[in-house]
Amino acid sequence: MLLIFAIIAVVAAGIATRLYHNTEKQSRYLQYVQAKHYALGAEHYVALLLEKDKKNDKKDGKPVDHWFEPWADANDRFDVAEGEITIQVLDDQGRFNLNLLADGQSKEILETLVRILANEKIDPRLAYRIRDWIDAGQEVSGNGAEDSLYLTASPPYRTGDTLMASVSELKLLQILTPDEYARLLPHVTVLPDSKAGLNVNTITAAVFQSLSDKVTEADAKAFIDGRGRDGFADTQAFNNHPLIKGKIDENVIKKLSLDVKSRFFSVYIKAVYRDVTFYLHSRLARDDEGKVTVIGRELDVSPKWVAALRESVR
């Protein structure tokens, strides 16, 4: 009789334990889903701000994007039911678009990236390897590399032969150390348009300094501090800036497609619901009519450099 009772007790304990674990698992899953929807709601909120910004630009006749517009001021912490949401928005056209190197004939674009690398004390061969990674041929350019190098890796792989889809592809080029990769991230991005250049109203000091050997670190800081809360109204106002004249070649301005407005943005979101934290990095594209489309999502913790970059340009 005691044996039967003991068996029943063990079985009952097992059932209770499994029920507890299943309940906890279901509870965590529901919290995860709620945190995810908080993050997606924040993404939609930023998209609406960008669409409204475009409408206002058309109404005012001033198609300009800068760091003191409402979409940029969305960076804040919001309290929500049993949680909170933190948003950080970046203009992706304030950083160097690596896919500009798809124009394999432009020495101005290549030299600009080489200067960024030099300022960060990174091997300049990386610029040539990026160009070879993107182009469709197998001819090695300068200090670049093609399939013949990467096929010797374990496991072997080939060059992308198309536009880069993620900055993380840089890790495949067999040059960057983890520390160098982290130092480079705040200055570069990859956009789905190889013609999408730089917005002078949101450009970082490091990228501005890379536009010419004649631009010093002090010049770059003075430029960032001096463009004001409204930015440049048009590219002509930028070209007439005293720090531009005689220092930045006109071909650089043309090849890098310098502009005063942007189409591509990144949103870094941290959504907390009860005990669950959900991180989301959304990439948004805004067309000429103002419609915003999500072109990519990554479940990614907001890097520390994002806040530092925003602090440095505002």
Image: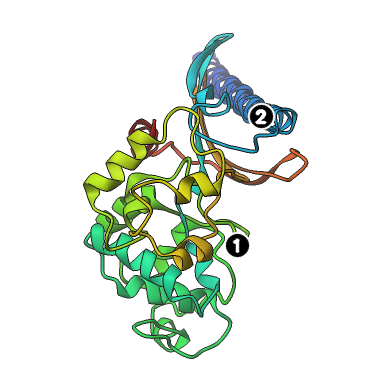
* Lateral position of residue 234 relative to residue 302, left or right: right
Q: Position of residue 311 (x, y in %)?
A: 35, 31
Residue occupying image coordinates x 68% and y 29%? 44
Taking the image as shown, residue 64 lies to the left or right of residue 291, namely left
Q: Amino acid at mark 1?
A: Lys
Please state which amino acid type lies under the numbered disc 2: Asp
Would you place residue 297 above or below residue 85 in this image?
Answer: below
- Residue 143, placed above or below residue 223: below
Q: Residue at x 43, y 70 (%)?
A: 108
Name the image quarter holding residue 33.
top right
Q: Quadrant of residue 283?
A: top right
The circle on residue 195 is 1
In the rendered image, the vertical position of residue 59 relative to residue 183, given as above or below: above
Image point 26% across, 70% down: which residue?
A: 123
Q: Circle 2 sits on which residue?
A: 53
How many residues crowd around disc 1 within 10 Å: few (fewer than 14), some, or many (20 or more)?
Answer: some
Q: CA distance from mark 2 to mark 1?
A: 23 Å
Query: Callout 2: 10 Å neighbours few (<14), some, many (20+)?
Result: some
Camera-side residue: 155 or 4?
155
N-term-proximal mark, 2 vs 1? 2
Marking on residue 79: none
